[in-house]
Image (cartoon, rainbow, N blue to C red):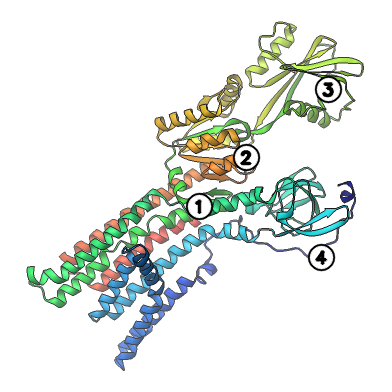
Amino acid sequence: MEVAHRRTLPEVNQTAHQPNPGGKRRLNWKRLFSHRELLLALGSGGLMLTAWVWGMQGMMPWISVALYIAAYAVGGYVKAREGLITLIQERDLDVNLLMLAAALGAASIGYWNEGAMLIFIFALSGALESFASEQSQKDISALIAMKPETALRVGEDGMELVPVEALAVGDLLLVKPGEVIPADGVIRTGSSAVNQSAITGESIPVDKQPGDGVYAGTINGEGAIYVEVSSPAEGTLFAKIITLVEQAQQEVPGTQRFIQRLEGIYAKTIVAATLGLILLTPWLLGWSWSFAFYKAMVFLVVASPCAIVSSVMPAMLSAMSKSARKGVLFKGAAHMDHLGSVRVVALDKTGTLTEGSPVVTGLYTVEGVDPREVLAASAAAESLSEHPLAQAIVRKAQAEGLPIDGAEALRALPGWGIEAKVSGAMWRIGKADAGDSLLPGPLAEQLREWIAEGHTVSVIQRDGEYIGLIALRDEVRPQTKAAIARLHELGIAVAMLTGDRSVTAHALAKEIGVDLVYADLLPQEKVAHVKALRERYGSVAMVGDGVNDAPALAAASVGIAMGGGGSGAALDVADVVLMNDSIERIAETISLARRARRIVKQNLAFAGAVILMLIVSNFAADIPLPFGVVGHEGSTLLVILNGLRLLR
């Protein structure tokens, strides 16, 4: 490893250009108008228009008919294929065959243009829905396309290009400027700005220095860096994201599942009613056969549930796409739907509301004792310990530029702390008790004050005499207060579930504005409280990052995992992943989910009202077939475009 660190960084003449799936985007018109289904729909519309113009000339009408047939074939191919697959494989009718039957019925009674218009608008609406589905995955598709295949591994014998699957924890890699970082790791040498937008949704590259972590699939900037692998290929955050995306395709909202179940029954009912209109009305109402057939065709067109079928998924998929661009990944549209109904958000404390690692927040010494001497000696005694509190003291001394001398006669004191000889004196550092009666008056008063504020306090002895206190605390994330305030603006209650002490938890809750506090919890007790919150509020989101949070994430209506530093277990069971650990995105995403639900409700109400109005108008006002086509398919286009608004 030392040999590798001394190697000269190679010169690189060019920078690779990679896709940026995390960047902000509006509707991509170029992508839209290169979409295969849309091109077929537009081709159908062009043929229909040409056939209509030719027919107006009154010359060789068979050419006009041939052009209409071509329009039917070009526009109806995709939907006919889908409908036949459903009919053959699932033995069920769907809206695709229903609309094609209506178009062919219109043609059979001489309404070639109306049938072609029906095919054109139906194909156009289907293309837009397909585009919405693909748009929701395009950021992730770009991410998967960036999957690194090889890595430049540095060894004692030089460098070799190896598959990423061959990398092991501890391997040292050289990542040149502009290259995709091939594995999760820690920078050992070099510095650079890394584009993490594909993973975290950050639009601005992040400056990275030695000691900073980097993710597989992110793009190195202008500086060459040496990275020590910290995770095998299958355990990288990148690999976990791909797994999440694959799972997302299996989930659909409950409303959509209900519509899918209803679609087959509804289609059969419409077909039966159409046949009834054709066969029975001449006998019952005295209609002519041609008039009955015409009315039946209008009914078949206007009663088809195209707009209802298209009311849900375009909106949900568009919302998922917008969230993905901001670093929030959903495992399925169903979870977007559920998040919109959340009334309380429960959050783990450590690593979610806080940074997850303690820092020294205060040092108090008795009169006549130099605080810098106490900090330096404490750091020397703690320097060999891996305990997070010990490491926080060492980091504080290093930040103050204090010399950390070697410690002698180091001995752990089980259940209390540590002792060691530093510079000839015997020092002891251990946990304090709020009721410790052995402390001098000023120390005892300061101890009680710090504990009431939620600090963890260590007491310090020198040669058996109490001389000082060190306060430590897991610092609150900078964005925590604003994130909770935003949730309150949405009318959402905020609960904290933590295994930490009650005093510490309540002090933190008071500081950041949490409504409900549950402390001293074991993992199974977190689950019990999540279930109680569900009974009280109806729908609850749980946010966590650790293995101990996984059961609670699974028990919640929606589980939200911290993707940056979250455990594999938390990512596995969560429904939503915050790739940049940005808890301020929670309220924003809930607001987006609520907007998606509102749009779905608008779509369903509008689609149902249009279908009912057109059915009534068919019998009460004798609307012509062209009006029925435009009204029905126009409503379908409107609900899809209404859903696509969420892409902005």
On the image, the x and y values in percent for residue 395 come to 79, 31
The Cα atoms of the two marked residues, 1 and 4, are separated by: 40 Å
Residue linked to disc 3: 381
Image position, residue 226 (x, y; %):
81, 51
**Nearest the eye: 28 or 424:** 424
Q: Secondary structure at mark 3?
A: helix
Q: Earlier in the sequence, mark 3 or mark 4?
A: 4
- State the separation of the CA atoms marked 2 and 4: 39 Å
Q: Callout 1 environment at 10 Å: few (<14), some (14 to 19), or many (20+)?
A: some
Note whether residue 514 is visible. Answer: no
Amino acid at pointer 1: Ala
Amino acid on which the number 4 mark rests in the picture: Asn
Disc marking residue 248: 1
Real-space CA distance between mark 2 and mark 1, rounded to the nearest whole angstrom: 20 Å
Amino acid identity at mark 2 = Ser
Q: Is residue 503 left or right of residue 268?
A: right
Q: Is residue 328 left or right of residue 467?
A: left
Task: Give the image location of residue 468, x and y in percent.
Answer: 78, 15
Structural crowding at the residue carrying mark 2, measured as other residues with C-alpha within 10 Å and reported as few (<14), some (14–19) or many (≥20): some
Question: What residue did someone put label 2 on?
Answer: 567
Q: Mark 1 or mark 4: name the one nearer the start of the chain.
A: 4
Q: Identify the residue shown where x is 31% and y is 87%.
A: 55
- The numbered mark, 1 or 3, whose residue comes first in the sequence reads 1
User: Which of the two discs, 2 and 3, sits closer to the camera?
Assistant: 2
How many C-alpha atoms fall within 10 Å of the one at disc 4: few (<14), some, or many (≥20)? few
Per the image, the residue denoted by label 4 is 13
Res 1 seen here: yes
Residue type pointed to by label 3: Ala
